[in-house]
Amino acid sequence: MKHVPQPRRRLTTPSMTSSLSFLLAAKHTELSELQRLAQSIALARSTAALVHELQRERGLSSLWVGQASMGQAPPESDLRQQTRCTDRWVAQWLHESAALIAAPSAHGARLLSRVAYALQGLEALALLRSRVAAMALGTQGLSADYARLIASLLAVVFEAADSASAPELLRPLVALFNLMQGKEWAGQERAAGAALLASAQAQAHEQAHLIDLIEAQQRCLEVFESFASAALLPFWQERQRAQPLVERSRMRRLLLQTPAGGALEPAQSRVWFACCSQCMDEMRPVEDQLTQSLVAQASACMAQVQAEIGQLEQRQHQAGSAANGANGASETQRSSAFFEAARPTLQPTPQGLAGGLEKSVLDLVQEQGQRLQAAAAELETLRASLNERKLIERAKGLLMAHQQLDEPTAHKALRELAMNQNKRMVDVAEAVLSMSRLLAPRR
Amino acid sequence: MKHVPQPRRRLTTPSMTSSLSFLLAAKHTELSELQRLAQSIALARSTAALVHELQRERGLSSLWVGQASMGQAPPESDLRQQTRCTDRWVAQWLHESAALIAAPSAHGARLLSRVAYALQGLEALALLRSRVAAMALGTQGLSADYARLIASLLAVVFEAADSASAPELLRPLVALFNLMQGKEWAGQERAAGAALLASAQAQAHEQAHLIDLIEAQQRCLEVFESFASAALLPFWQERQRAQPLVERSRMRRLLLQTPAGGALEPAQSRVWFACCSQCMDEMRPVEDQLTQSLVAQASACMAQVQAEIGQLEQRQHQAGSAANGANGASETQRSSAFFEAARPTLQPTPQGLAGGLEKSVLDLVQEQGQRLQAAAAELETLRASLNERKLIERAKGLLMAHQQLDEPTAHKALRELAMNQNKRMVDVAEAVLSMSRLLAPRR
C-alpha cells in the first residue's frame, strides 16, 4: 500500500485549528455588522425625531403663510420656536451621520449615498425658510418642498432597514420605516385636506388625491402592525382610540362625501389642521418607544455575539494547548464524521455555542452554517415587504431615464396607469419593469 | 419677517462639504468591497484548480480500487503522483483561504462559515486516502466521500458569487459556479456509469440516476452559457465539439438504451471512464480562462473606482479652497436645485464622475444614487439564477431539521417527490418551503 500517501499531519492539525479561526472570524464579522447596524439605528432614531420636527415646522409655516395671505396677524413666536427646535435636531442628525464615515468603508455605499442626498436637502432648508418668510411660496408649494426634504430623510431609514443583516433587528426596522412613512402620508393628508377646505369647494381631483393619501397611509400602518412587537402593539392600539383620530375620521367623511362642486367651510380648515396634527403627535411616542427598543435590542444582540466570541476563543485556546485528540475523540473519529452520511441532524441547543466544549469542531461548523442559512432565508422573507417600495422607485427611475420625466411626473404617470387599469401601483411598477427587461439589450 | 430664522451658514457650508465626504466614503466602501471580492475570486480560482485535482484523484482511486478488487496489478505511480499534485493545490488553497481572515471582519460570515466547513473536509482527506489504500471503501463509497468533499468546496464558490456586490463580477462568478457544478455532475456521471457497466447488467434505477445526473449537468451548462462572456463562448463551443464528447454521447446511448436486465460489457467500463475523464479535462481550460478574466476584471473595476476616488478628492480639495460660490453658482441657486420638481433627469455621462468639475454636488449625489440603485436592481436579477440552488438547499435543511433526516435522504425525498409529481426539484422545494411558512408560528 506504500503507493498511497500516508495521512499527512501537516494538512490535518493546522486545518482543525483553522476551522475554529474561521468560525471566530465569522463571529467577528457578525459583531462588526451589528455595530454598523447599531449606528444606523441611532441615525434612524435621530431621523425620526428630526422628521417629526420638520413636519411640525411645515404645519406651522403653512398656517403662517395661510394667515399672512389673508392679511391676518401671523403667530410669530410659535414658528420661531419651532425652527429653533428643528435646528437642534438637525445638529444632532449631522452629528450622528458624521459618525457613519468616521470608520472608513464601514457602511454600505447605498446608505452613505442616501445620507449625502439628505444632507443636500438639509442644506436647502435655510433657503426654503427664507422663501416662506418672503411669502415666495404658497402653502401647497412649501408643503411639497418640505415633503421632498422629508422623503430624502425617510430614504435613509429605508436603506438602514434594507441593509440590516440580523433578522431580529430588520423586523422592527421595517416596522419603524412603515410607521414613519405612514405618519408622513398623514402629514400630506393634512396639507391636502387644508387646501381643499381653504378652496371652499369640493373638487373631485383633490378628493381622489386625498383618498390616495389615506390609502397609502393605511397600507403602511398595516405593515407596521404586522411587524411591530407584541409589546408595542397595545401601546399603539390604545393611541389609535384617541379623540383626535375620531375627530379626523369625522372630518374625512365631510371632505370626501361632499359632492364635487359642493361648498366647504374654509373656517373648518383650522379644526382639520389641529386634529390632523394631534393625530401625528399621537404617533410620535410609539415611534419613540420603537426606536428605544431597537437600540436596546441591538445592544443585546451585540452582547450575545460577544459572549459567543469569548466561548470560541476559550475553545481555541484549549484546542491549542490540548494538541490533538482532545475531548477523547481520535483524529480518525473526528475526520470520519465528515463523511458520515447517516449523521443525525444536530438539535439546536438552547445555549447556542455554550455547549461548545462537548461538541466537535465539525458540530460547531455545521451549527453555524445552519444558523446563518436560516438567518439569510428569514432576512429574504422579511425584505419582501420592502420590495413593494423598491419596485415602485425602480419603475419611476426607469420612466425618468427613458422618458425624460421628472420624479413627480413619473409618479403621476404610474398612479394614473394604476387607476385606469384598476390595479395597485406595485403591479403597474412590476409590469413597467418586466417590459424594460424585454427591451434591454442582452449581454 | 424677523420671526423666521435667517438662513444659517452653520448649517449650510459644512453640509455641502459633507455631501462630498459621504460620496467619497461611499466610493471607499465600493473599493473595499471590490477588494474583498478580489480575494474571494482568488480563492474561487484556487478552488476550481483544487476541485479538478480532487476529481482526478477520485477517478484514479476508483480505477485503482476497481482493479485491485479484481486482483489486477494496480497502477501505483499514477495515483501517487496525483495525490502529490492534489496536495500542492490543497496547500495553495489553505494559503488563499488564510488571507480571508488576515483582515478582521472583512468577509461575510456565510463565506467564512463555508470555508470552515470545507477545511473540515480537507482535514478528512487524509483519512479518506488511507481508507482507499486499505481497500476499506468500494468505488461507490469512495466516490460519494470525494463528492461530499468537493461539494463543500463548491459551496465556497457559490457563496463568493452570492456575496458579490458588483454586477459585472457577479455575472462571470455565476458562470463559473455553474461550470464547476456542471463538471462535478459530469464526474458523478462518470462514477455512476462505470458502476453500471461493472455490474454487467442494465438496471432501471441506476439508469434513472444517470439521467438525473446528465440533466442536472445540462441545466448547469445552459446557465453557464447564458452568463459566459461573448469572448469565452467560442472557446467553450469549440471544445464542446471535441472527440471525447462525441464518444461519451455514443456510450450514454448504449448505457441508457439497453433495456433493464439487458447485458452490459464490464470491459467497456475503462473506455467509458477514459472518455468521461477527457470530457472533464476539456472543461478545465475554459474554467481557467474564465477565472483568469475574472481576476483581470476585478482589477479593472478597482482601478476605475480608485480613479473616481481621485477625482472626488480633487473636487473636495477645490471646494475647500474656493469656499462658497464655487463654479459660479450661488448658494441659493445650488440649494434651490434640490426643490426643483421639473429638474430634468441627468444623462449618464460616458466618463462617469470625470465631468465632475462642471457638475454641482447635487448632480454628483443624484448620479451616484441612481447608479447604485441600478446596480442593486441588476444584482437582484442576476442572483435570481442562484436562487434555484438556494431553494433546494433550504428545503433540504427544513426536511433535515423537522423530519430528522440526514442530507442524502432529504435530497432523495425531494427528488422522489419531484419524480412522482413530474415536477422540477426547485418547484417541489418551493412547495415544501411554502408549507413550512404556513406551519411556522407567527411572531
Image: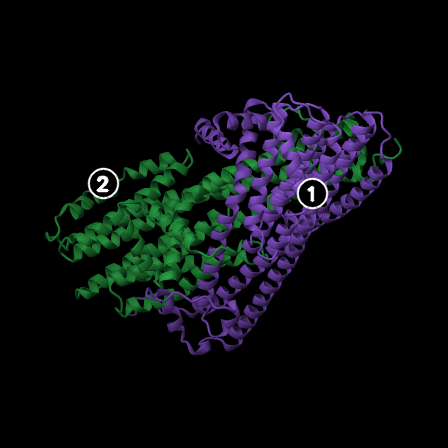
Chain colours: A purple, B green
Distance, label 2 to label 1, CA atoms, is 79 Å
Which residue type does callout 2 highlight? Val
Q: Quadrant of residue B172?
A: top left
**Label 2 belongs to which residue?**
B246
Q: Residue at x 61, y 29 (%)?
A: A257
Residue A396: x %, y % from top left: 56, 30
Disc 2 sits on a residue from what chain? B
Residue B139: x %, y % from top left: 25, 61
Q: Residue at x 26, y 51 (%)?
A: B189
Task: Residue B189: give its label.
Answer: none
Q: Which of these two is toward me, B145 or A368?
A: A368
Q: Secondary structure at mark 1?
A: helix
Number of residues whose C-alpha sits closer than 10 Å to that of mark 2, classed few (under 14), some (14–19) or many (20 or more): some
Q: Is residue A82 left or right of residue B441?
A: right
In the rendered image, the vertical position of residue A339 relative to residue A103, given as above or below? below
Label 2 vs label 1, nearer the camera: 1
Disc 1 sits on a residue from what chain? A
Which residue type does callout 1 highlight? Pro
Q: Secondary structure at mark 2?
A: helix
**Label 1 belongs to which residue?**
A244
Number of residues whose C-alpha sits closer than 10 Å to that of mark 1, classed few (under 14), some (14–19) or many (20 or more): many
Q: Residue furthest left?
A: B262
Residue A81: x %, y % from top left: 84, 41
In the rendered image, the vertical position of residue A442 relative to residue A222, given as above or below? above
Q: Residue at x 44, y 50 (%)?
A: B157
